[in-house]
Image: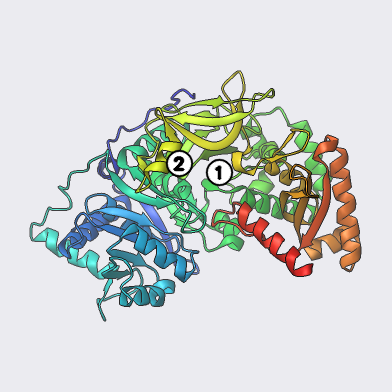
Amino acid sequence: MSERLYECMPITDLKDMLKKSGEKYADKIAYQIKIEEGKYKNITHKEVRQMIDALGTALIDIGLKGKRIAVIGENRLEWEIAYLSICCGTGIVVPLDKSLPENELKTLIERSEVEAIFYTKKYEKILENAKNEGVGKLKHLISMDRKTHEKGIYAEEELIEKGKKLMQLGNKEFREAKIDQEAMNIMLFTSGTTSASKAVALSHKNLSTNLMDIASILEIDCTDIFLSFLPLHHVFECTVGFLFALYKGAKTVFCEGIRHIPENMKEYKVSVMASVPAIYERIFKMIKRQVEKQGKLEEILQKEEQYRNENMEKKKQVFKEIHDMLGGNVKLLISGAASLDSKIEEKYRLLGFNLVQGYGLTETSPVISMGNKKYYKTGSIGKTVPSVKAKVINANEEGIGELIVQGPNIMLEYFGNRAETKKAIVDGWFYTGDLARIDEEGYIFICGRKKSVIVLKNGKNIFPEEMENLMNRIEGIEESFVFGKQMSEDKNDIKIFAKLVYNQEIVENTYKVQGEEKIYEVINDKIKEVNRSMPHYKAIKGIILTQEPLIKTTTNKIKRQNNLDQIRKEEEMCN
């Protein structure tokens, strides 16, 4: 595991974190909110904590003490204030995936037994219907957009004002609420279909110990500026992007959308971002296109080699022009939630961007391991954070086996599912379901999901994620899905196929071809080149080309079973 590199503020729970960091960074800007082009509103850490206290006081006043309360919507200040006002003295917070269709959202409202829900305008009609239909225990709707209470719907803004008045009159119920750090205060649903998704029970202890671990290995302080982009209901963004920024007294700014990431980074002088591989690949392609347009690609490639062994600060100076494309202030980029292509990782670091990989799961609050300035290897997810132990079990001859972990960040249980909890946690060790190897220095390398591995007739294991990284390097391929296909009645007669999502404009311009037939030919030739670089048994035997995106979670992870079902359905329709 990593050693603690930096002093960190000790906290017992999130309420304690808000109190201590609030006192320490009171007048520092916590959020910079864009009002309109060129106009911003700054909110200090002191003001944020006053809003949380006021909203929590009002929630208790309307009868929500000890209740489960959901939050759904786009990333914004109101979402974060709601989350903390619920779990720091009111009840149990249930963050919900903003991409869920109406039927699935209603299922989770019923399963979680929430009695109130904070939401943005987009969800108003759906939630009004849910309340009127008597879905679950839902009684109260709280809008993040409305200004006043009307037609039975509360307004978050008005509740905050109400809470302030109650506190002025001496109401201390929320501020003096005691936190049981061992109890469930956060309920999160794993990604997947709502019937199969599990309700993960997390405590304040889980999140607080994870925040302290992250703080002890990353050099982040109150001068840093975090870009919030990944959905807040996802524990990676929630812990690393949202709660960690408040813990360190940093500033948070909200991204205006995937296409605006580079311009927002430039506009706000962002220094820290936690995101997924697909975003870093997208940014890298944008940088490459800009450099090509300027006719400087060869010059940059030569400089990369020339300064390969220099430190990051020197590289940042050499490639200042490229850093300026992203605001010139980037200090740390964290990649998580999926596997990052080591070639992309290496390219960022050659250009002087401190890009590291982190790893974790909803069940681990989430961070298990993370690279940092001292502990870093290309392709690795780093060493475990200081409080966490990891080991590999049932390893094969290459040292690859299932990764299991132990630490104070491990969930309490899968709520209401004792059987699945017993499968996942055995003798205090959490079974991640990921296959990995750990080298002699303690660096962890993830190889793929245990469930995703394709086993061939010769007993060889194929890790789809590894293959997909190779496919995605082909110019014009935006994403790929590698799967095994049964070729005869023999169940073990499996061949490797790939579904490739291509960008027509890039393919046509790069390879000077037109028409589906020619595009298929040129991409198939590229696949043959990839095949020649791998052992014969890994060769791709067939491809499916499409311009339709793969089915993914909100954090861009491929939903393997859903994509496989779609392929089989399409094949049946053709036969």
- Going by the picture, which residue comes out furthest to the top? 440
Structural crowding at the residue carrying mark 1, measured as other residues with C-alpha within 10 Å and reported as few (<14), some (14–19) or many (≥20): many
Q: Which residue is at a point 50% across and 53% down the rendered structure image?
A: 191
Q: Nearer the viewer, residue 445 or 343?
A: 445
What's the mark number on residue 366?
2
What's the mark number on residue 465?
none
Q: Nearer the viewer, residue 254 or 2?
A: 2
Residue 243 makes an appearance in the image: yes
Residue 78 makes an appearance in the image: no
The residue indicated by pointer 1 is 336
Residue 515 placement (x, y as % from top left): 89, 69
Q: CA distance from mark 1 to mark 2?
A: 10 Å
Q: Amino acid at mark 1?
A: Gly
- Going by the picture, which residue comes out furthest to the bottom? 151
- Local secondary structure at mark 1: loop
C-beta proximity under 8 Å, tags 1 and 2: yes
Residue 531 placement (x, y as % from top left): 85, 42
Quadrant assignment, res 532: top right
Q: Amino acid at mark 2?
A: Pro
Sequence-earlier tag: 1 or 2: 1
Position of the C terminus, as image quadrant, is bottom right
- Left or right, residue 255 beside residue 290: left
Residue 457 placement (x, y as % from top left): 77, 37
561, above or below 159, in the image: above
Q: Which residue is at a point 22% across and 43% down the rendered structure image?
A: 179
- Left or right, residue 423 beside residue 562: left
